[in-house]
Image (spheres, rainbow, N blue to C red):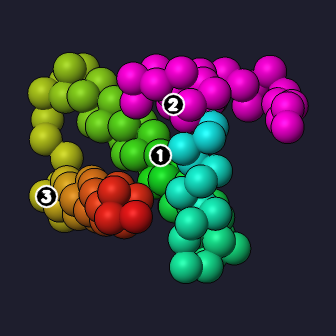
Amino acid sequence: MCPRFAENEFADLTRAAAHSSMTVGGYVAEAALAAARADNPQAAVADHRRAVRELMTANTRLAAIGNNLNQLARHLNSDGALPAQSATLRLLDRVRDAIENVDDTVDAVLRR
């Protein structure tokens, strides 16, 4: 069996394998066997896809929050005036929620 991957897919596998201190072939084999040995292989793949979607959503939210923090810093650097406390608290709530979402997703991935 010789699976074929698009360049971007192979790059993803290479990064993941390096992060796991494995060869690409070993990583692909281990991932495939983990899914195949699961009680419900279709569910294992679906869970992985769900986790990836959740992490992508969290990444988008964190990018938006980073943009808000940059705007806040620019505002503070321009005149030093603090924004309304309610706006700051809303931003901090979004930061906390996004971080909790990432933590929960990572925990779910690690429990597999």
Q: CA distance from mark 3 to mark 1?
A: 26 Å
Q: Which residues are magenta?
A: 1-27
Q: Residue at x 64, y 63 (%)?
A: 36
Residue kind at label 1, given as amino acid type: Asn
Q: Which mark is residue 85?
A: 3
Q: CA distance from mark 2 to mark 3?
A: 42 Å
Residue count near mark 1 (Cα–Cα under 10 Å), binned few <14, some 14–19, many ≥20? some
Asked if residue 81 lies left or right of residue 44, the reply is left
Q: Quick check: 80 above or below 96? A: above
Residue kind at label 2, given as amino acid type: Ala
Image quarter of residue 71: top left
Asked if residue 99 lies left or right of residue 56, the reply is left
> Quick one: label 2 or label 3, which is nearer the N terminus?
2
Q: Label 1 belongs to which residue?
A: 59
Residue kind at label 3, given as amino acid type: Gln
Q: Quadrant of the N terminus?
A: top right
Q: Label 2 belongs to which residue?
A: 16
Residue 24: x and y, percent?
60, 24
Residue count near mark 3 (Cα–Cα under 10 Å), binned few <14, some 14–19, many ≥20? few
